Amino acid sequence: MMSESRPNILYIHSDQHTAAITGCYGDPVVETPNLDALAERGVRFTDVYCPSPVCVPSRMSMLTGRHPHELQVWTNNHILDSGVPTFAHAMGAAGYRPVLIGRMHALGTDQLHGYAARPIGDHSSNFPGSGGAAAGQGKEVERSGPGQSAYEVHDEDVTDCAIEYLNRLGERKRSGEDCVPFSLSVGYILPHSPYVARRADYEHYRHSVTMPRIRVPYSDELHPFDKWWREWGGTESLAADDIRRARIAYWALIGSMDRMIGRILEALEQNGLAENTLVLYMSDHGDMAGERDLWMKRCYYEDSVKVPAIMSWPGVLPEGQVCSRVASSLDFNATMLDATGAPPLPGSHGRSLLNLVRDPETTWDDVALSEYCLYEGWTTRMIRRGPWKYCYYHGHEPQLFNLEEDPDELNDLAGDPAHADLRDSLRAEVLKDWDPDWVSEAIQRRKAEHDLYREWVRQTNPPEQFVWPRTPEMDFLEEE
């Protein structure tokens, strides 16, 4: 569908923000007045799942509308094929000039993937580092507290640049210039760890952030994946002071990010651009933040795999609506393209949400898929269908939860004979278009490719593009 005047697009994408730690999602401590106000002006989605609970696969899937196995992008070392069209390519084909300011986290020599301009890039190299999952969550928790993270400095520069961009558009509009609709993507790194926040923000939350609600001691009774993940990351046993300090910083980083978003939304309004702008906020995945004694992401529990998603479009979408239908991040890709009249992406699994949010009685299939696979032998996939979540671990026992009756995922029903038929049905759906043996072999082939590519980088020192100038002085930790 299209409005009479094609909308502007403002797509704000954060990194590692769990939905639950947002005011409008029910957290009583964190202060997110700008995201809360955006939800009041639009639609807040309660059950949106990322295509992979780790950065690069999730982001590349969101850009293309395809699942990680279709892209063969499973880890933070994998490179998206430049020939695969993205959301930005489709917007460009529709006559927009898509601009990205900030984080995309794409690897390889193509640092645009369809964007026409990128004034600020990522904080890290264009090229992949060592393989596998990033160990050291325990160290991240221990090295937490007041101080400064370069990630926050990066996002402040991103915010200033986005405001300057909107101010220039406003000047052109005020001058009477005939302006085409804009498509602006803003990529934040916050609230991604390190769990280090500016002193004032840290002190603001020091006495209000509590310990995790759900504690699960390390033991041989853990699900094999949880046990491995805690061993790999060194989180078998963490000191209570470290846990609380890291959580305080995480809440503070979310509050800082919300203020930055507020500045961008204020600039949008002050420049007279808000009236016909579709604004979308979402994150690439969540953060366990100590719940179940797990940290960061890479698992299928709600705090890791569910993402915040808020969408506003004045005069077109309803205000103050809550949509509790199950959806995927890929669906928001399709929604933005539908809103602008851009061509759909070939091979995309995304479904436009526009008709659903305008008419809740619209037929909708409540399903979302996510997958996480890595060199160390874990080949996994999750499906959320209706109230049920089924997690497949190749070569290991699955998990099955009823999220309506058990939102904290404390009662694994996978071994219950009364749910055997449902478990087998969901397993068949997971495996219908996804062969774990092929995935396991393919990811090892990718490792060989990655190892060669990394050696090429080491030997030839190829030029970097769109890299934000990070310096060591930007990162420091103060005494609590």
Image (cartoon, rainbow, N blue to C red):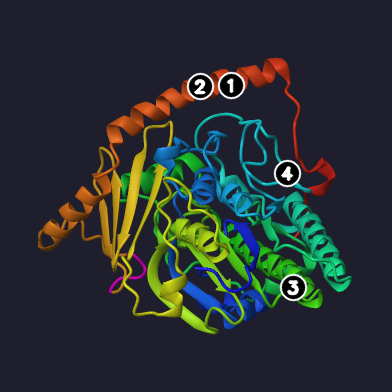
Earlier-in-chain disc, 3 versus 2: 3
Earlier-in-chain disc, 2 versus 4: 4
| Amino acid marked by disc 4 | His
Q: Which of the numbered marks, if any, corresponds to residue 273?
A: 3
The quadrant holding residue 209 is bottom right
Earlier-in-chain disc, 4 versus 3: 4
Please name whichever residue, 173 or 288, is drawn nearer the observer in this view of the structure.
Answer: 173
Pointer 1 with pointer 2, Cβ within 8 A: yes
Residue mark closest to the camera, 4 vs 3:
3
Secondary-structure class at tag 4: loop
Separation of disc 3 and disc 2 at Cα? 46 Å
Which residue is tagged 1?
A: 453
Separation of disc 3 and disc 1 at Cα? 44 Å
Separation of disc 2 and disc 4 at Cα? 24 Å
| Amino acid marked by disc 2 | Glu
Separation of disc 4 and disc 1 at Cα? 21 Å
407 within the magenta span: yes
* Image: magenta residue range: 405-409
Q: Residue at x 60, y 66 (%)?
A: 281
Q: Position of residue 167 (x, y in %)?
A: 84, 66
